[in-house]
Amino acid sequence: MIYFRFFGETPAEQAKNLAKNFLEKLKDFEFVYFGLGFSGKDKQTAKKEFLSLIVSEFEKAGKNFSNQEHEVFLLCDLDRKKVEVEVKPVFIFGHYNKYSREIAQTIHYCIECKGRKCSACNFTGKQVQESVQEIIGKKALEAFSARKHFFHGAGREDVDVLMLGKGRPFVLELAQPKKRKISLKEFEENVNKEKRVRFHSLAFCGPEKVAQVKTTEHDKAYEAVVECEKEADKEKIGALAGQRLGIEQFTPTRVEKRRAKATRKKWAEITRVKALERKKFSLQLKTQAGLYIKEFVSGDSGRTKPSLSSLLGQPCRCVQLDVLEIIEK
Ligand SMILES: [Zn+2]
């Protein structure tokens, strides 16, 4: 939090001093519009005389008052002669592809030490060493001279799952940026030097995009490699292609801690099946938003019905998974 004090005998002197201190404190920050609010015992009367004085002081420095379009907001505490400054975050919307099975979507802190670094995590503080968030976030902090990054994805894939096709939508939020007007085209080229993750169609957006990205549900297309316990029955496997299944999935054991326990009805359409080795085959499928694929393959000890295990009459597991496409309506 940025804050400063202001002094002066008369409101005019105070306004002058406030503007001077403010411009000094925020000299490295890019902004055109500022917003203004007041707190204190007689804020109504003070506001009347003070507001126009401050606005005219700021206008001399080429800064305009707007409580709608502001990039920085000043909250003046008239009793304590103190100002708190809030710098609005920058939001960037885009899509990402992930071509590695060793990169997480967001930072996974060590369960033992919660990021403080311990022997369990080899003193890294993290469970997974790399993430899509850090790859773009680190470069974004430099480019925008920002303090912190937050990553809001439209759902997530597991660390060992590739994200292919047109990519997954996300919003990157940058807290307290000094710069706001950088070329996103150049930035995109710069982050894409990292070949295992690619970012595209980056564009500035408003904060409302975060909720939109997080709440919109997308159907998906996957490719899964399935391994059966015994040699797979070719006829049974072949018969899977073209099937559209109604599935009842009880919250998987794997995500029990994060999600409410309930049975969810979902559909899946198996579009293609291909035999690989003796016990292995691959399948492509389209699924309704929210279906857990690894559990649809294994059956999750009967929690997902039907499953590939139940359809083939033997235990199966998903040994490799890729998101082929996130189907955006
Ligand atoms: Zn640790």
Image (tube, grey):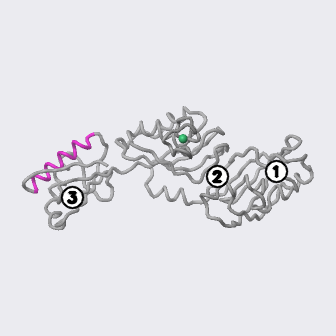
x, y percent for residue 248 = 74, 65
For label 2, the crowd category at 10 Å Cα-Cα, with few meaning under 14, some 14 to 19 and many 20 or more, is: many
Q: Which mark is residue 326?
A: 2
Predominant SS along the magenta part: helix
What's the CA distance linking mark 3 and mark 1? 65 Å
The amino acid type found where label 1 is placed reads Cys
Write down the region rendered in magenta: 11-27
x, y percent for residue 28 = 29, 39
Q: Earlier in the sequence, mark 1 or mark 2?
A: 1
Of circles 3 and 2, which is in front? Answer: 3
Mark 3: which secondary structure? Answer: strand
Q: Which mark is residue 77?
A: 3
Q: Which residue is mark 1?
A: 316
User: Quarter of the image containing the C terminus?
Assistant: bottom right
Q: Nearer the viewer, residue 316 or 166?
A: 316
Figure check: 195 above or below 244: above
Residue 51 visible here: no
The amino acid type found where label 2 is placed reads Ile
